[in-house]
Structures are given as C-alpha cells and as structure tokens.
Amino acid sequence: MNNTILHKAATRGHAAHGWLDSYHSFSFANYYNPERTQFGVLRVLNDDIVAGGKGFGSHPHDNMEIISIPLEGSLVHEDNMGHREVVSAGEIQVMSTGSGVFHSEYNNSPDKPVKFLQIWLFPNRLNVTPRYDQVKIARGENSLQQLISPHMSEEGSWIYQDAWFFGGRFDAGKEFVYERKREENGVYLFVIKGSFVADGQTLESRDGLGITGTGSIRLRSLAPESEILIMDVPMENKIK
C-alpha cells in the first residue's frame, strides 16, 4: 500500500526580500511548519528567483549535499576551494560541503532575473573533504534523464547519499512508469512546468508529491512541454 503527502504550490512557505523571491517546500529560515520539515533525507527544496546583479554573499555550510538546478539564466559560484564558475540552465551544480565550505552565489546577469531550484539532502557520510561538481544535462524529451546518483561512474553527477534524481519534459498525453531504486527509499515528485497525473493524483506547476510504500509510479503528462523532477531518496539516513 502506498502512502502519499501532497504539497500544493500555494501552500509553500514564501519569503520576499526584494532582490530574492523564494518559495519553500519544506521549513527553511523564517518559515517553519512542523509537518513539513523534510521528506526522508530531502531537507530543502527552494524555488528561487534572484534579481539581476544580486545574490547570496559568502556563507558557510557543512555536512550537506547541495544541488542547484538553474531553470532560467545563470549563477556565478565562488567558494574557498578556489572555484569560480558560471552554472546555467541546462547544467546542474553539486556541492558536498562535508567538513565545511564557504561559498557565494550571484546572478550572472546585471538586469535579468535568474530562476533556479536549490535542494539540500542530508549526506550518508560525515565530514568528508568538500567537493564541487558541475555537469551539463540533456533534459529528456518524452523520457527521463538521470541527473544525480550515488555512483561516480553513472550518468549525471553524484552525491554522498543513496539517492537518484531524474528529470524530463513530456508532450501532453505521454504515459510512463517510474520504478523506485531502493526498497528503503521514497519518491518525491516536483512539477517544474505544466501538469501531470501521478497514480491518480493531479499535480500542477510547482506542486510536490511524496510517495512511499510502492515500487512503481505511473505518470501521465497533461499539458504540452510538461516538465518534472523526480527525487528518489532514503526515508531514513544511515551514516556509513
């Protein structure tokens, strides 16, 4: 028997700081909802818009896997490991913050906003040497593309966690089945654009749906160019 938890887009936390417009699927900063602190090891799912020329100044993180997925525009990343990189739509950025890292993220454009997803997962190894990775991704057209896995040798990037991310863009009416990677994992669906039906539940743009207790999920896109992010994550974190 599968169990689901629905997070409609309009129920997310919201922070408007002028230069930053951010929606929080889970408790974050000044937004706290005791029923929405995490989904398994998925701790943060922020939907951010940063104004031109603005960004997050240098700040610390440790023992967190941080994934940034630009949707429109590009970000400038700098850290105390010596990286200065531009990550753009069509790429994915991963940081394993491990024993500690300082970094900053700024909009690469002086006058156009950048839109991106910022995702945090608890790692299954603590105090590792911090690392940075950035890879190009080919968004699947009517198929799912692997973005993240636990394995360095697989497609996409990798993290210190038994988690897999997939993304894809689908024409209206396309049906497909997602098979969960591990029995211990749950699956969190996030609709980036358009709409889908997932096991009978209709999901609109920016809706999230957490599913546990099932091995496969049947999905159907309802609108042209519907885009979805699938996060297959452990429901309990086992430190290795």
Image (cartoon, rainbow, N blue to C red):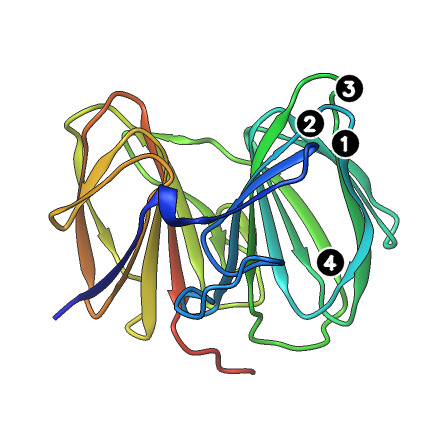
Residue 220 visible? The answer is yes
What's the CA distance linking mark 1 and mark 3? 8 Å
First in sequence: mark 4 vs mark 2: 2
The amino acid at mark 4 is: Arg
Q: In which quarter of the image is the N terminus?
A: bottom left
Where on the picture, by quarter, is residue 49?
Answer: top right
Q: Name the residue under label 2.
A: 51
Residue at 48% from the left image edge and 47% from the top image edge: 155
Residues under numbered marks 4 and 3 in contact, where contact means CB atoms less than 8 Å apart: no
Q: Which mark is residue 131?
A: 4
**Label 2–label 1 contact, CB within 8 A:** yes
Q: Is residue 87 depicted above or below 93 in this figure? A: above
Residue 193 in the figure: left or right of residue 90: left
* Label 2 element class: loop
Discs 4, 2 touching: Cβ within 8 Å: no
Classify 156 as above or below 136. below
* Distance between the alpha carbons at the discs numbered 4 and 2: 28 Å
Which residue corresponds to mark 1? 54
Q: Name the residue under label 3.
A: 110
- Callout 1, which amino acid? Lys
Q: Label 3: few (<14), some or many (≥20) within 10 Å? A: few
Closer to the camera: disc 4 or disc 3?
Answer: 3
Location of residue 133 with respect to 164 vertically, above or below: above
Q: In this view, does 225 lie to the left or right of 118?
A: left
The span from disc 4 to disc 1 (Cα, nearest Å) is 25 Å
The nearer-to-camera label among 4 and 1 is 1
Quadrant for the C terminus in the image:
bottom right
Q: Which of marks 2 and 3 is nearer the N terminus?
A: 2
Label 2 vs label 1: CA separation?
Answer: 6 Å
Q: Residue at x 62, y 58 (%)?
A: 29
Residue type, mark 2 in image: Ala
